[in-house]
């Protein structure tokens, strides 16, 4: 044919050619098989024509030009669909592929058939954008692509509701496997959901390629087996499941590889990617060490990364539900196969018989161990054969060839069964609907990726089967494209010109259909006992020598025969045909596997082991099995609508950009591409039945009825076609069907869509008109109603206006009448008052006149009597002699003068005293009094200038005028009748204000007496006998003892509170501050017990009063402690102080009262009724106290009351009236000093610190206070800082130290992480946390699990400090500052840690990639967050009061980023509640549980709720609620709370669901999730996507996929939840009951606290405390039991007993040493000294 075409071109070429013309260069040699090549004319001026062909070669052609022909324009630049080629011949097709291949356009259409040329390199054609671009597009709309074929198969499946298949064919190395993967990629992406099943299908490819693909000389990733992947879709087009069928794995490759070929990929990947430990365990090494991997002399494959592929294989196995044990067993069998291949035999003689033995036995032992069999039994199975005849067993040795054959059969059998099991395992994961009977709603797309046509230098049995499969596929292609189409044209009587094509049915008949076909002869010869490969060849030659398609051997010794296939002639070597066809597994090996301890090995041979009998059952040969599976495949394909992809190999060198014209032309010839183009161009690929055509396209032609109502179908079809395409278009009508072209079908679809769109617009217009008219009528009706109401309102307003006017008129008239009456009455009252006042004035004047007259009379009488006495003295003088009279007169005058002078001086003294008395109250200088009051304080020198420090005290704004709120007005209103407003110096019988509680009354009276004693108005009580005994019990603890009691009789007081009673002694042993210094809840300690006990007392004696002399500090603590702990008497205390300051004429008492006032206003505030009165009273006070007290009180009102009395530090600040300077230490060692006052809270200090260091991520940073080895968190809330300092001072007093010596320190550090914490957002925050972590590791707060973790932390620190350079001196210095002291020992010195650090440093990624130090810090912070979640927790004390029981009721609540933990005192977790399980938390009242205070209730998804009492209930609730709400805003997972109300078929976009279904949202839930109404997501149960109502789901507070157990809980009923919880609690109770009691548990409740060993001010770990319950080398300084600590006699007795025990132990040791003869004076000197000391 091609020769005739060539002659035709030569005879017809006589035209003139110009430069630039494209021509066909005809081959002058006319060799058979050559194809004309395209060329371009370069020069045509002279007699010769110069042309350059497509390969770049120049040719000079002489005239006449008989060997060129002009090229059709469509062949110049190429076309996308070769049906449109003008040069419809072989060279036109070839050049079209060449042009497109050079432009990286590897895909070309031939109608709906895709031709794909392998580019041998990666092209950017398969990104997500390409998938989106080809979605819902028809073939021809876009450039040719494999995605277009996949999309049309997918669209046809949904459109026609029928199964589809994509058949990828081509030679080995043409790219079939890659094309199949691209189709699968598209189908997985376009199915609408990235579900788990889609991921599993994609992950199955790497596993199958690893176990079934290998490198051949023609293909680096050649599929050595065939597979058919059937992907099943739901009716909505979502992937539901898949199934993989495998065909004819090439097992001979396991034991033999040709040169430059490799074994299966899995062996090389495993050896490259397996860790060293696993290799040692399995006895593996390098690939070069194994015979079966080195026969092809090719260990590496260019372009493949075996190590990375191993990781991908393991990940794929995890996705496909391979368990860890199954993965290990697979590796174990692969290792056994490699070791088996290394077994070598040598010939020997045993009993004069040829036999074999092993060269080395090391591999035998390892192989036997991996197979789980006995090594001797395995050796016998490989070297001996057992024959069973008539009940007898005969054993004989094997020859060398037989032993090697058995070894090879063992390898092939194990690997073959393993491969089948892996395929079945994958199917079990992806084929989920195997048990469903009803699959009517499911359709599938099949992908066939089978071995290509092969023709090697040496072809064997496998190549025969492979080529037979390709013959069947070619016949299917021929039958579908040529035969069926032309037969249907003839049946339908279509006008058609028959096209001849190459039919390979004769080859198939010769191989499998005829009576004595080749496969039948092979199978028959395999059954004969004496059948050999030679006899098989003879039979083949005898029966088929006459067939022209069979090529007989050239000579009698020739072992080759040939077959003329559709792709060319292939010579097959008959050697080994029968053995490979039998594919038998040695019976001795099968018996050996039956005894194996390897259960996995027995499992994959399960079916074979079941068939073991005394008489061996004959199984089907490989030919029969392969033919049966191939027939099943062809039947499956015949039921599908096929899409063909023809893969073309451009060259045999596997290089890019090289196009071998001869090789490509050969592939085009045998694939029938020329005939395909012709039949596609001339044929009608689209056909519809009359009913289908009318029902689908009748909308194009109005008036056409549906098919069931249309009488004449043919006329209806003609009307539609003529209206849409015209009468002259190329379409035909058959007997039952319509035949049209591809382009016409697309045009009809576009017309149909246009008409549907137009009809939809009309319908929409009518519906919208009806809707808006309905809306208009509704609005019109509403407007009328609104107007009527509006008019009513307007009339009512006018009426109300008139009514108000009349009322005002009445008011004016009544006012004027009342004013007249008032003026009239006032006139008469004024007249009466003037008369009364005149009378009273006159009476007062008369009284004063009488008084003056009386005083004058007495004065005149006094003067007269004095004058009389003077005259009498003169008279006596005159009676004296004259010589003495003068002297006596002078003396008398001097006495008179002295008397007058003395009188004047006395009058002056009295007047001065009166003047000073008047000025004493307002101008008292109390500085000396202050010094006297605070004499116990040694005032430290503070900086005179505090302007340089930052302050946490906010500026206060001035308030309104409160001058009218006077204390006298309040007293007149609220004081009880017996009390006066001014200062008194006596006890009172009842409080100033009315109190309903008897305890408050007694407390008020006790405070009154304490205030009198503090101000000096009442003497101290007389000291008792035991006054010398030091009382270390804080006053606050004594006040706690009085809470929660009622009072009855005096006798009960004496019985319960006698100083000698046991109860009183026990109460003194309880301490206010626990040794942990965590946040204590009063409800969980002493106060909770007292509130529950409700102890009773009488009011006859005030036991609350301290009946001994106390210091000023104790008095202050008593007064303010009652005010803090008894809020109901706070106003009483202030009224008492104000009363004692009113008209107080004592300077000392007045000054003490204002000092007390200034301290009280800094601790608590009065109630709202007294607030303004107190402020007015303070503002009118002394100028040196009024502003200071006013500012302190306003701060107290703003920040709330204190919980502890003033500390020693506050008293110093009160003395100096200056702010408090608090040094706060950061975790990097720096210190910041801030100014504070008594009301300063932790939040204020934290905010100032954060602003000072520019900290943006403030959450979780809190203040911590450290005292000795105790650390307490102040948080970042409203807790008062000075309360914590006061507690530390009280604790120091309990330990016998002074308050001022309490070694407390404040720290600013990270306390808790948020679940969504990101270390990359705030560099300052990350730096502080990093310093906290490294210092915590250094001092033992954070502990690493092993040496490697410690070395990694040190390596990261070193990298941050010194970079990548490793220097020994720097490393030693760094390790000394990095490692904790306990980590450095004799066994693990600095050298050990230095080597560890260097190793980690060299292997670290951050060193190789040169990370920035900031990024390494972020990595350390993130690692610490996940490694120590409990160490970054916020702790609260709580008491379990309701709900399911816990092991202990008193517990510690730890809230961190992972969830809520409830722990006991030993840090044992009692209950763990992740945030995903928390459904609610709320603050509740403790009244139902007989608890005074607030509680919080935690609800779980498991259906139970627990209630805990804590003073921090609000803080706990707020923290957990913030975390839960924050997680919900960021969560993408929701749970259905009930079944959906809609059916699956109601709407496409509405997703059906059931209660308990888990949805994954397409984006985070956000804040306003429920207000949106509808959201879209994916249902994890059924894989469906769509929208669902937000009010029917519950947002799971989690950022990762929830566990399946939690999802199951939401689908349970309340009864099921209760039953599950009951079972869990019973199991927990059994576990707790089985735990033994230990001395450690006993010590927690009854042992004393450990003694303090250091006074270090640094915070230490809570784990490093002394353990009193275990062995120690220290002497016992105090008894162990805390109940005898306060009894000195018992203390001494306990220590003496301990010394006696030690003495006895030492004596026993010495006696034992003497008996053994090992006692030496030098060695046991310390024991002798100890005995002497005792």
Image: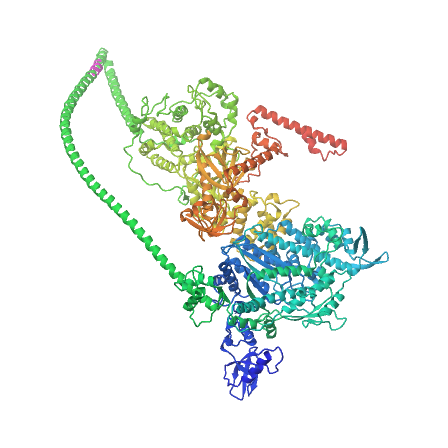
Of residues 605 and 500, which is closer to you in this image? Answer: 500
Q: Residue furthest right?
A: 352
**Nearest the camera: 1435 or 697?**
697
All told, the count of numbered labels is: 0
Left/right placement of residue 765 relative to residue 88 reads left
Percent from the top left, x then y, of residue 780?
27, 49
Residue extending farthest front: 711
Indicate whether residue 106 is drawn in magenta.
no
Q: Is residue 862 magenta?
A: yes
Camera-side residue of 939 and 1196: 1196
Residue visible at 47% across and 29% down? 1087
Region rendered in magenta: 860-868
Display coloring: rainbow
The residue lying furthest to the bottom in this view is: 47
- Residue 1218 x/y as whole percent: 39, 38
Residue 119 visible to the viewer: no
Q: Residue furthest top?
A: 879
Relative to 1320, say whether 1721 is above or below. above
- Whether residue 1721 can be seen here: yes
Q: Is residue 1113 above or below residue 74?
A: above
Seen from the viewer's position, the closer of residues 1185 and 941 is 1185
Q: Quadrant of the C terminus?
A: top right
Residue 502: image x %, image y %? 60, 72
Q: Quadrant of the N terminus?
A: bottom right
The secondary structure that most of the magenta stretch takes on is helix
Position above or below: 1178 against 1459: above
Residue 383 occupies which quadrant of the picture? bottom right
Left or right: 443 with respect to 394? left
């Amino acid at each position: 044919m091609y020769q005739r075409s060539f002659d035709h071109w030569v005879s017809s070429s006589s035209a003139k050619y110009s430069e630039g013309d494209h021509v066909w260069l005809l081959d002058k040699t006319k060799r058979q098989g050559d194809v004309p090549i395209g060329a371009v004319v370069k020069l045509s001026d002279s007699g010769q024509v110069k042309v350059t062909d497509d390969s770049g070669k120049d040719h000079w052609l002489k005239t006449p030009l008989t060997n060129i022909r002009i090229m059709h324009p469509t062949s110049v630049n190429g076309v996308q669909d070769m049906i449109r080629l003008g040069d419809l011949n072989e060279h036109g097709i070839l050049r079209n592929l060449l042009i497109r291949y050079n432009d990286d356009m590897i895909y070309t259409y031939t109608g709906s058939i895709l031709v794909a040329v392998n580019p041998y390199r990666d092209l950017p054609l398969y990104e997500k954008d390409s998938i989106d671009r080809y979605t819902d597009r028809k073939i021809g709309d876009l450039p040719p692509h494999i995605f277009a074929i996949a999309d049309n198969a997918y669209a046809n499946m949904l459109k026609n509701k029928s199964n589809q298949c994509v058949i990828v064919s081509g030679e080995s190395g043409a790219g079939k496997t890659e094309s199949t993967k691209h189709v699968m990629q598209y189908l997985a992406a376009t199915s609408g959901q990235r579900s788990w099943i889609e991921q599993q299908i994609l992950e199955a490819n790497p596993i199958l390629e690893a176990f079934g693909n290998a490198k051949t000389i023609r293909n680096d990733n050649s599929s050595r087996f065939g597979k058919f992947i059937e992907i099943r879709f739901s009716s909505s087009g979502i992937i539901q499941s898949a199934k993989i069928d495998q065909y004819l794995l090439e097992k001979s490759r396991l034991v033999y590889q040709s040169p430059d070929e490799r074994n299966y990929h899995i062996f090389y990947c495993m050896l490259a990617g397996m860790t060293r430990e696993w290799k040692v365990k399995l006895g593996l090494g390098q690939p070069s060490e194994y015979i079966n991997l080195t026969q092809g002399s090719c260990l590496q494959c260019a372009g493949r990364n075996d190590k990375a592929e191993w990781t991908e294989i393991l990940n794929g196995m995890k996705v496909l539900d391979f368990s860890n044990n199954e993965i290990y067993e697979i590796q174990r069998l692969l290792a056994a196969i490699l070791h088996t291949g290394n077994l070598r035999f040598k010939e020997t003689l045993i009993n004069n018989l040829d036999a074999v033995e092993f060269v080395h036995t090391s591999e035998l032992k390892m192989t036997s161990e991996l197979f789980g069999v006995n090594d001797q039994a395995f050796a016998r199975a490989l070297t001996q054969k057992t024959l069973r005849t008539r009940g007898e067993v005969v054993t004989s040795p094997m020859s060398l060839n037989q032993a090697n054959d058995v070894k090879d059969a063992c390898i092939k059998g194990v690997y073959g069964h393993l491969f089948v099991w892996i395929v079945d395992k994958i199917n079990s994961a992806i084929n989920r609907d195997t048990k469903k009977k009803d699959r009517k709603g499911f359709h599938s797309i099949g992908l066939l990726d089978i071995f290509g046509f092969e023709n090697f230098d040496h072809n064997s049995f496998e190549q025969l089967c492979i080529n037979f499969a390709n013959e069947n596929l070619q016949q299917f292609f021929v039958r579908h494209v040529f035969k069926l189409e032309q037969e249907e044209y003839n049946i339908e009587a279509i006008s058609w010109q028959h096209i001849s094509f190459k039919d390979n049915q004769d080859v198939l008949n010769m191989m499998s259909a005829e009576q004595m076909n080749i496969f039948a002869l092979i199978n028959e010869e395999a059954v004969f006992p004496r059948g050999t490969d030679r006899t098989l060849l003879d039979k083949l030659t005898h029966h088929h020598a006459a067939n022209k398609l069979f090529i007989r051997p050239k000579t009698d010794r020739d072992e080759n025969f040939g077959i003329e296939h559709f792709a060319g002639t292939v010579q097959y070597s008959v050697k080994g045909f029968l053995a490979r066809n039998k594919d038998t597994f040695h019976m001795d090996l099968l018996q050996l596997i039956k005894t194996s301890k390897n259960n996995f090995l027995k499992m994959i041979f399960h079916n074979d082991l079941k068939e073991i009998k005394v008489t061996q059952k004959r199984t089907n040969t490989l030919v029969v099995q392969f033919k049966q599976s191939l027939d099943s495949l062809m039947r499956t394909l015949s039921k599908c609508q096929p899409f063909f992809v023809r893969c073309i190999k451009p060259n045999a060198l596997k290089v890019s950009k090289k196009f071998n014209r001869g090789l490509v032309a050969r592939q085009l010839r045998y694939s029938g591409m020329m005939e395909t183009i012709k039949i596609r161009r001339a044929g009608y690929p689209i056909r519809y039945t009359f009913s289908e055509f009318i029902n689908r396209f009748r909308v194009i032609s109005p008036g056409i009825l549906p098919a069931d109502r249309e009488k004449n179908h043919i006329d209806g079809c003609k009307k539609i076609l003529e209206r849409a395409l015209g009468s002259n278009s190329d379409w035909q009508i058959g007997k039952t069907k319509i035949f049209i072209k591809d382009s016409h079908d697309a045009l009809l679809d576009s017309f149909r869509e246009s008409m549907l769109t137009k009809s939809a617009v009309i319908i929409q217009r009518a519906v919208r008109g009806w809707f808006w008219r309905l809306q208009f009528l509704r609005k019109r009706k509403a407007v009328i109603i609104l107007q009527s109401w509006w008019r009513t309102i307007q009339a009512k307003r006018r009426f109300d206006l008139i009514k108000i006017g009349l009322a005002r008129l009445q008011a004016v008239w009544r006012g004027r009448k009342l004013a007249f009456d008032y003026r009239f009455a006032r006139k008469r009252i004024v007249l009466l008052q003037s008369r009364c006042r005149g009378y009273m004035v006159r009476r007062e004047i008369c009284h004063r006149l009488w008084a003056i007259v009386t005083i004058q009379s007495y004065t005149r009488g006094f003067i007269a009597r004095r004058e009389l006495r003077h005259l009498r003295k003169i008279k006596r003088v005159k009676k004296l002699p004259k010589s003495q009279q003068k002297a006596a007169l002078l003396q008398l005058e001097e006495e008179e003068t002295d008397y007058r002078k003395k009188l004047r001086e006395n009058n002056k003294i009295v007047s001065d005293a009166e003047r000073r008395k008047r000025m004493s109250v307002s101008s008292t200088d109390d500085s000396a009094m202050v010094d006297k009051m605070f004499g116990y304080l040694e005032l430290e020198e503070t900086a005179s200038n505090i302007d340089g420090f930052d302050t946490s005290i906010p500026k206060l704004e001035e308030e309104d005028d409160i001058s009218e709120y006077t204390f006298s007005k309040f007293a007149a209103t609220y004081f009880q009748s017996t009390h006066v407003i001014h200062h008194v110096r006596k006890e009172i019988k009842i409080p100033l204000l009315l109190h309903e509680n008897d305890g408050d009354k007694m407390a008020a009276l006790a405070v009154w007496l304490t205030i009198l004693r503090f101000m000096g108005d009442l003497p101290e009580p007389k000291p008792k006998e035991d006054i010398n005994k030091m009382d270390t019990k804080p006053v606050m603890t004594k006040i706690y003892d009085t809470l929660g009691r009622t009072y009855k009789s005096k006798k009960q007081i004496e019985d319960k509170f006698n100083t000698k009673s046991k109860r009183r002694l026990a109460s003194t042993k309880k301490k206010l501050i626990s040794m942990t210094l965590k946040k204590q809840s009063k409800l969980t300690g002493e106060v909770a017990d007292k509130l529950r006990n409700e102890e009773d007392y009488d009011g006859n004696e005030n036991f609350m009063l301290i009946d001994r002399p106390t210091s000023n500090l104790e008095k202050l603590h008593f007064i303010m402690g009652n005010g803090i702990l008894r809020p109901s008497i706070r106003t009483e205390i202030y009224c008492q102080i104000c009363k004692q300051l009113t008209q107080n004429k004592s300077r000392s008492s007045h000054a003490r009262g204002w000092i007390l006032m200034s301290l009280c206003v800094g601790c608590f505030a009065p109630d709202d009724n007294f607030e303004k009165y107190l402020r007015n009273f303070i503002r009118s006070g002394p100028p040196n106290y009024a502003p200071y007290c006013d500012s302190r009180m306003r701060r107290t009102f703003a920040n709330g009351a204190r919980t502890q009395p003033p500390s020693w530090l506050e008293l110093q600040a009160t003395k100096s009236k200056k702010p408090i300077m608090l040094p706060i230490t950061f975790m990097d060692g720096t210190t910041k000093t801030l100014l504070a006052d008594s009301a300063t809270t932790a939040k204020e200090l934290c905010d100032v610190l954060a602003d000072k260091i520019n900290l943006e991520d403030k959450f979780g940073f809190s203040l911590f206070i450290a005292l000795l080895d105790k650390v307490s968190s102040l948080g970042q809330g409203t807790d008062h800082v000075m309360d914590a300092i006061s507690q530390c001072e009280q604790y120091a007093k309990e330990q016998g130290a002074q308050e001022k010596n309490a070694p407390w320190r404040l720290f600013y550090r990270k306390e808790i992480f948020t679940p969504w914490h990101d270390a990359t957002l705030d560099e300052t925050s990350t730096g502080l946390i990093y310093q906290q972590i490294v210092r915590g590791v250094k001092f033992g707060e954070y502990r690493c699990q092993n040496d490697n973790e410690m070395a990694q932390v040190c390596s990261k620190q070193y990298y941050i400090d010194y970079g990548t350079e490793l220097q020994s001196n720097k490393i030693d210095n760094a390790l000394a500052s990095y490692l904790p002291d306990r980590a450095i020992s004799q066994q693990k010195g600095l050298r050990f840690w230095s080597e560890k650090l260097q190793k980690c440093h060299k292997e670290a990624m951050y060193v190789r990639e040169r990370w920035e130090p900031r990024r390494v810090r972020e990595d350390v912070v993130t690692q610490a967050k996940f490694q120590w979640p409990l160490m970054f927790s916020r702790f609260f004390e709580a008491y379990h009061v309701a709900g399911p029981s816990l092991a202990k009721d008193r517990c510690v609540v730890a809230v961190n980023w992972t969830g809520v933990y409830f722990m006991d005192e030993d840090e044992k977790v009692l209950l763990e509640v992740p945030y995903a399980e928390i459904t609610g938390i709320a603050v509740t009242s403790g009244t139902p549980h007989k608890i005074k205070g607030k509680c919080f209730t935690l609800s779980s998804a498991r259906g139970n709720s627990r209630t805990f009492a804590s003073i921090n209930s609000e803080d706990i609730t707020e923290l957990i609620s913030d975390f839960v709400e924050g997680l919900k805003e960021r969560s993408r997972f929701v749970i259905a709370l009930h079944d959906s109300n809609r059916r699956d078929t109601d709407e496409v976009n509405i997703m059906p669901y059931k209660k308990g279904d888990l949805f994954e949202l397409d984006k985070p839930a956000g804040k306003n999730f429920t207000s949106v109404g509808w959201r879209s997501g994916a249902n994890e149960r059924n894989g469906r996507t769509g929208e669902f109502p937000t009010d029917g789901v519950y947002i799971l507070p989690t950022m990762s996929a929830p566990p399946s157990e939690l999802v199951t809980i939401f689908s349970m009923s309340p009864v099921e939840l209760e039953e599950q919880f009951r079972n869990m609690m019973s199991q927990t109770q059994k576990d707790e009951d089985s735990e033994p009691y230990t001395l450690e548990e006993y010590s927690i409740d009854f042992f004393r606290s450990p003694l303090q060993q250091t006074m270090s001010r640094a915070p230490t770990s809570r784990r490093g405390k002394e353990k009193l319950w275990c062995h120690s080398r220290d002497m016992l300084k105090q008894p162990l039991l805390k109940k005898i600590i306060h009894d000195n006699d018992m203390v001494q007795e306990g220590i003496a007993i301990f010394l006696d025990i030690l003495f006895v132990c030492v004596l026993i040791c010495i006696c034992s040493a003497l008996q053994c003869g090992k006692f030496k004076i030098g060695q046991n000197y310390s024991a002798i000294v100890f005995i002497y000391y005792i």
